[in-house]
Image: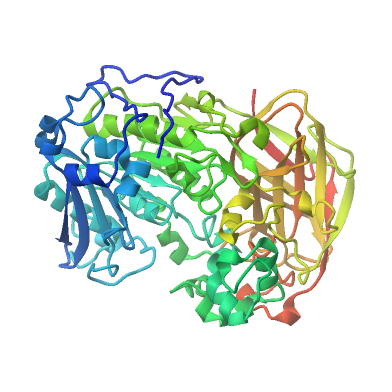
Amino acid sequence: MTVKRILIALTSVVVFSCGKGGDAVTYIDWTNCEIDSLWVASHYSIRDVMVPMRDGIRLSTSIWEPRAEGFTSDGSDGFATSKEILAGRPVIIIRGDNESAPGEVDHTDINRYLRNFAARGYIFVNQSVRGKYTSEGEYVNIRPYNPLAHGKDADPSQIDESTDLYDTVEWLMHNTRNNGRAGIRGTSYTGYFATAAAIDPHPALKTVSPQGPVTDWFMGDDYHHYGAFLLADATNLRKMVEVRGFKPQGGPRTSKNLNDEDVYNLFKGMTIADWVDMKEIHGKGDDFLYLHKDFDDFWYNHNLLNFIGKDCPASLVINGSYDSEDLYGGLETFRQMRDRGGRDKAHYVFGNWGHVSWKSYDFEKIGQSWFGDGQSGFLMDKIEVDFYGYYLEGKGKRPPLVYCIPSDETRKELMQGKNINHKWIASDSWPWKEPSMEKLYLTADGTVSFSAPAGGQRTYTSDPWNPVPFYVEPVKENIFDNFTDYMASDQSFVGTRKDVLSYHGEILNDTLTLAGPVKARIRFSATGTDADFVVKLIDVRPDGYWQLVRFDVFSTRYRNSYEKPEPIEAGKTYDLEFMLNDVCHRFVPGHALMVQVQSSMYPFLAMNPQKYLENQYTATKDDYVPMDVTIHSGPDASWLELPVIK
């Protein structure tokens, strides 16, 4: 595989370099070199061990250690020298379901996203958590924080993921040739374990890097958005096709060939109670979803950020602005590690990636939105090298705390193959400048305006038996791609539906840059007693593609409390306010802003019955009712508050 050379020059608001804080970092020119299986075999040895925990349980652990005789470089090319190997190298840990299993991590992974650390002779440790692969003990899916496991008088029989990582680091410090410094990294599910490591960390653990991490399954990741149930993400589609005897139009009876219309029809007409009854289509142990229908201690203790302290190691949180699964998790992890653990060591990278796509050098598009080439390489060959070089090797000066790259033009003919690394912005804060919070009003004539409009209203009917589809692309692709691609997908397909209100903006003559959180306020009245509101911010391209920039959903039942839901009164007017995840986007000349409001996004979101129930998971066919929804406009009625960078 030929890997394009990554530009190291950085054009940004603030320019930083790796000077002589210690030895300077040397970047590797990967143009004519590659790490393959032969290189790994001659440079690394692998041993499998069972690492003991404080309660006697042993965890399956695969350790990749550098061979000093294999490293013949003099160091000028960025590769480690044999002298450095013999002196001890940093340890990088990855923990997860089956991380220690043969083939789970191999030379392909090293060449794909760990090559800079392999070239520098880092020690790689891959560990399977309790009850997985050959690890002993009981497996708990996303094990919660255990307060009894912490504190100077904690009973050794009390454990959680934080204590298991502590014990692992302690063992590694005594049983590998290391330099006394370790770091942990993880992506998506494994990112949860990287976050866990930040709680009461081992003194030798110097870095944690949660990347698009699972964080809060009630407020914004995987299973819910602000308590609204994410139906499709909680479902095993392959099993569902079998159970329902469904015949996809996209291909054989396997979810690999489901297209977007198939997945819509697969779920259509199914109540939430039906879904609960079909146990075989759920993930193992997913009964917690309906056993903890509202926010409670279960959800609180599973959000490990609630227990981060000032002893949090230096952190590098990596986030994709178009992450379909854990956008909220990355943003919130960065904020909490910054605010709880210390602003001077909380690092954040915000790029135009989908879920996990920052690990691919070839990334440049999501669906039909093209972002340009090179940003993943800049992350792996520049940003991460600087971060780990500084904290794990003592090289260079402290890197910038924040790197971000705004999305802007996404038309294929303008962006395919175009290197965009000159667009990276380096600073010590997110956003890089304090934004001016400006209201974009929704008007009664179906437009958006930065000027307060006169009063008025628009109405639509939300029919639970004909919900708004969440995704339809003109190019039919694998449904699992669709579940990622919808984050930057074309929203024009719902533009003619009577149950979606589109608010159009004028074509822009100047660039409008947004960076930071977006606040939505919807003044509404409805004929039902419960409702969901989906609000979407859209960039209308000159080619007619209405690119989704950001969306979120809020259930009216939680407008006053996530712990104690309550109905709305039919016909009464309410003001509903909630936050959309941070944006980093430039609306460029020739494009236009648009906002859409709707009450379903199916089957991404479970259909709200629109009749208030104490427990929505009990909803049967008789509970689903059509509802008229009126959106009010006026000087202080419905708007999006946008973070405008001047």
Quadrant hosting residue 62: bottom left
Q: Is residue 177 left or right of residue 578?
A: left
Q: Is residue 548 above or below residue 76?
A: below
Residue 315, position as x, y percentages in the image: 35, 39
Residue 611, position as x, y percentages in the image: 74, 72
Quadrant hosting residue 268: bottom right
Residue 63, position as x, y percentages in the image: 19, 52
Q: Could you tell me which residue is drawn at 78 percent across and 45 percent down?
A: 638
Viewer-closest of 358 and 630: 358
Q: Is there any visible trace of residue 310 in the rendered image?
A: no
Quadrant of the image containing the C terminus: top right
Colour mapping: rainbow
Q: Is residue 638 left or right of residue 5?
A: right
Q: Could you tell me which residue is drawn at 35 percent across and 30 percent down?
A: 30
Quadrant of the image containing the N terminus: top left
Q: Is residue 238 left or right of residue 245?
A: left
Viewer-closest of 65 and 634: 65
Q: Could you tell me which residue is drawn at 34 percent across and 27 percent down?
A: 29
Residue 171, position as x, y percentages in the image: 14, 53
Q: Could you tell me which residue is drawn at 44 percent across and 41 percent down?
A: 318
Q: Is there any visible trace of residue 142 in the rendered image?
A: yes
Viewer-closest of 409 and 258: 258
Quadrant hosting residue 624: bottom right
Viewer-closest of 395 and 381: 381
Tag count in the figure? 0
Q: Is residue 631 left or right of residue 179?
A: right
